[in-house]
Image (spheres, helix red, strand yellow):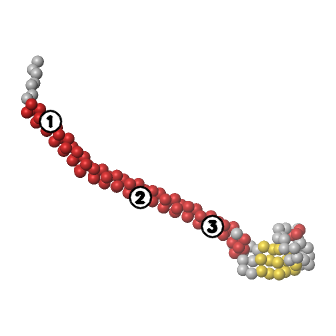
Amino acid sequence: MNKFKLSKDQIQKIGLSLTGLVFLLYIYFNFFLGPLNRSRNALAARRASERMDRALLERFAAATRGLDHRRQRLVALSPEGVLSRGYSITQDADSGTVLRTSDGTAVDRRVRIMLGAGRLGARVDEVDS
C-alpha cells in the first residue's frame, strides 16, 4: 500500500486551490445564478398574476352573462313585458282587484283594462261563466 506524503508546500497549494474553488462557486451562485433565479421567480410571478387576471376576467364575464340572461327573463315575465305581447290586465274599477275569472264581476260593473300602451275604462255588458 502506497502512502502519499505531501509536503507543507503542497498542502498550502491544495488549501489555496480549495479556497479559490469555494470563491469561484460563491461568485458563480451569487452573480450568475442569483439574477437568473430572481428573473425566473419574477417571470413565474408575472405569469401567475396574468393567469389570475384571466381567471377573474372570465368569472366576471360569466357572471355578467348570467345577470344579463336573468334581466332579460325578468323583463319578459314582468307585467309590462306580458302586456307588450298583447295581453291585458283587467281590474274591478271600484275595488281594484284583478279579475282572473268572469265570476269576479257582474253585468253593469265598471272595469279598468290595462294594455301594453295605455288604459281603458269599460262597463260589463255580458258575463259568460
Circle 1 residues within 10 Å: few <14, some 14–19, many ≥20: few
Q: Name the residue under label 2.
A: 50
Q: Distance between the residues labelled 3 and 1?
A: 80 Å
Image point 18% across, 44% down: which residue? 24
Circle 3 residues within 10 Å: few <14, some 14–19, many ≥20: few
Q: Mark 3 points at which residue?
A: 71
Q: Earlier in the sequence, mark 1 or mark 2?
A: 1
In the rendered image, residue 106, in percent from the top left (x then y), is placed at 91, 73
Task: Look at discs 2 and 3 and give the one toward the viewer.
Answer: 2
In the rendered image, residue 26, in percent from the top left (x then y), is placed at 23, 45
Task: Look at discs 3 and 1 and give the one toward the viewer.
Answer: 1
Identify the amino acid type marked 1.
Gly
Q: Name the residue under label 1.
A: 15
Identify the amino acid type marked 3.
Arg
Q: Earlier in the sequence, mark 3 or mark 1?
A: 1
Dot 3 falls on a residue whose secondary structure is helix
Image point 59% across, 64% down: which residue? 67
Dot 1 falls on a residue whose secondary structure is helix
Identify the amino acid type marked 2.
Glu
